[in-house]
Image: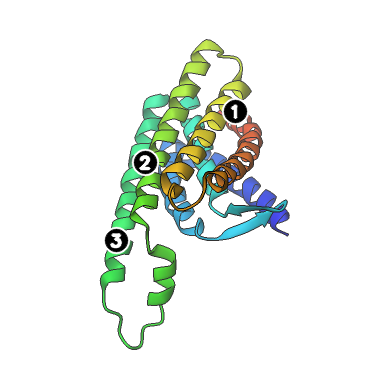
Amino acid sequence: MNIILGIISIILCFTTVILIEKIFKKEGLFIWISIATIIANIIVCKTINIFGLTSSLGNIMFASNFLATDILTEKYGANYAKKAINYALASIIIFIAVTQISLLYIPDVTDVAQESMKNLFSLSLRTSIASISLFYISNKLDIYLYSKIKNKYPNKLWLRNNVATIISNCLENYFFAFLAFVGIFDIGTILSIATIGSIIEIAIAILDTPFLYISKKLD
């Protein structure tokens, strides 16, 4: 069931990115990247099992940002893609600040939401800093690599899409795992978490390539 839902989610998510860009142009992708970043940071709390591997539910939404920035870089230029990531960074910082303040309010005796909100929004400062920092760095790296490969191999869309996204995703997974979990888990466990996450995201990155071609065709 999870595999079927994952495939459906990938198709719907990536198709939505294409449609938003078609309807609203680059501004639509700015909005999508900010919204997807916030949604991913909420649903990442849920873990699922795919092919016997444990994964977080946020992978597809996070991956959609790489597709969105690749479309921005390809069709509008790297500066617009960088601007979109800056907007997303501001959005997630505001989201975290607001949710953390909301948890400080003393709930009324009639309240039924506080405990659920704690489960969703309570943060580890170390994990949060690692997550936000690597989100920003990895997406900026993706834009940089995509632009460099495009300049060198302008006719190889599949190459720049896959190489930039896969390198950025894998580096993000490994650096995050070490920054967030050193001292909590042993090195073997940390490497396992990073490797499993990277395998899943490499598969998603490969699957987003046809959608980038579709976006180009719809110009």
Q: Most extreme residue toward the top, as rendered?
A: 152
- Report which residue position mark 1 lands on: 162
In the image, what residue occupies the spot 33% across and 88% down?
A: 109
Q: Is residue 121 left or right of residue 50?
A: left
Q: CA distance from mark 3 to mark 1?
A: 36 Å
Quadrant in which residue 19 is drawn: top right
Tag 2: amino acid: Ser
Give 186 or 115, whichever is nearer the viewer.
186
Label 1 environment density (alpha carbons within 10 Å; few <14, some 14–19, many ≥20): some
In percent of width and height, residue 39 lies at 46, 55
Which residue bears the numbered disc 3? 98
Q: Is residue 153 above or below residue 21?
A: above
**Image marks 1 and 2: residues in contact by CB distance under 8 Å:** no
Labels 2, 3: front one: 2
Q: CA distance from mark 2 to mark 3?
A: 19 Å
Q: Is residue 100 left or right of residue 58?
A: left
CA separation, marks 1 and 2? 22 Å
* 76 left or right, relative to 89: right
Q: Relative to 210, is 16 on the left or the right?
A: left
Q: Secondary structure at mark 1?
A: helix
Find disc 2 in the rendering and name its residue.
133
Residue drawn where x is 37% and y is 59% of the image = 123
Residue at image point 45% right, 45% down: 32
Q: Give, as a three-letter code, the residue at label 3.
A: Val
Is residue 36 shown to the viewer in this render?
yes
